[in-house]
Amino acid sequence: MTTLAIGLLGAGRIGKVHATAIAATPDARLVAVADAIPEPAAELAAAHEAEVRSIEEIMAADDVDAVFITTPTDLHAELIEQGALAGKRVFCEKPIDLDVQRVRDCLEVVEKEDALLMVGFNRRFDPNFMALWARIHEDKAIGDVEMVSITSRDPGPPPLAYMVRSGGLFKDMTIHDFDMARFMLGEEPVAVSAFGSALVDPAVVGPIGVDSAGITLITATGKIAQIANSRRATYGYDQRVEVHGSLGMARAENLHESTVEFAGRHGYTRAPLMNFFLERYMPAYRAEVATFVHAARHGGPVSPTGDDGLQALVIAEAATRSHLERRVVEIGEI
């Protein structure tokens, strides 16, 4: 296979991000776009010299090697199964579904069809987080990992219409941090304690209304991960990871709009933080797509896998129960 021909399912915000990343990836080409709303599909297809087709046409097409699933979450599992049955390589944005059993059923189809499936936890591909992981797990620079601290705060909440379909903060936002915790810990959590509140918009109640959370994970050997989430950070997009070990500590700091620092009689000032996930993580999206394209063309393994998607969702479900029931939830319960 010389060039990987890709069909994009979903022309919304994240679909546009992946279309841009595909365009920047050698040996990949966007050939078709599908969306339930004709206008964004036509606009995105025209921008990348692709065709507008239906999902059914893309799945049946001989000139499409792989599909990127960037639709609303409640369509992901069904489309993964369709792609697997059609012999396509499949990339799917997180989460695979909001229901754990539905994900397990979906992965059975993927395994039966021996399909290639990669799940979109793009933060694993951030250059800074990748360098942090390498220092910890390849160089063993801090000895044995003991504690992971993750701070993830958005500049502001997404639209309510989006949040209603997202499954709530733990399954939509924190799921990235659950995957990052697993990635950095190098060991699976066995229990979760989570507290959530509606502090940004107290008028919104229930699991979907949680916009602020503190979560603690613990592994069988006692390693601890702590996660702090908020849908409101007035100072920008706050993304930090710190890992403490038996020989020291390593951390990845926030990215600013520039490295310029000013000093005056009132002290030091720096450029603001990058203010949106598209700016902060665009290099990660490009690296993620390049990794998938390489695996799809050459037949190699992919990571994150469907099982990674399942494990992060299991933790998110446990965190949701912990928040609602005000207790520690064992992962084995899910």
Image (cartoon, rainbow, N blue to C red):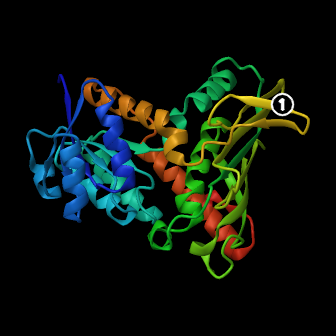
Q: Which quadrant would the C terminus be assigned to in this image? A: bottom right
Which residue lies at the image location 70% right of the left edge and 58% below the top edge? 192
Q: Farthest right residue?
A: 265
Which residue lies at the image location 61% right of the left edge and 29% below the top edge? 128
**Above or below — where is 284 with respect to 177?**
above
Q: Farthest front residue?
A: 265
Residue under label 1, please give it. 263
Q: Which quadrant would the N terminus be assigned to in this image? A: top left
* Residue 79 at x, y percent in the picture: 27, 57
* Residue 234 at x, y percent in the picture: 70, 56
Q: Quadrant of residue 181?
A: top right
Q: Amino acid at mark 1?
A: Ala
Q: In the rendered image, is residue 333 in sight?
A: no
Q: Nearer the viewer, residue 253 or 329?
A: 253
Q: Nearer the viewer, residue 12 or 193?
A: 12
**Above or below — where is 262 with respect to 31?**
above
Q: Nearer the viewer, residue 110 or 266?
A: 266
* Residue 70 at x, y percent in the picture: 34, 53
Residue 330 appears left or right of 277: right
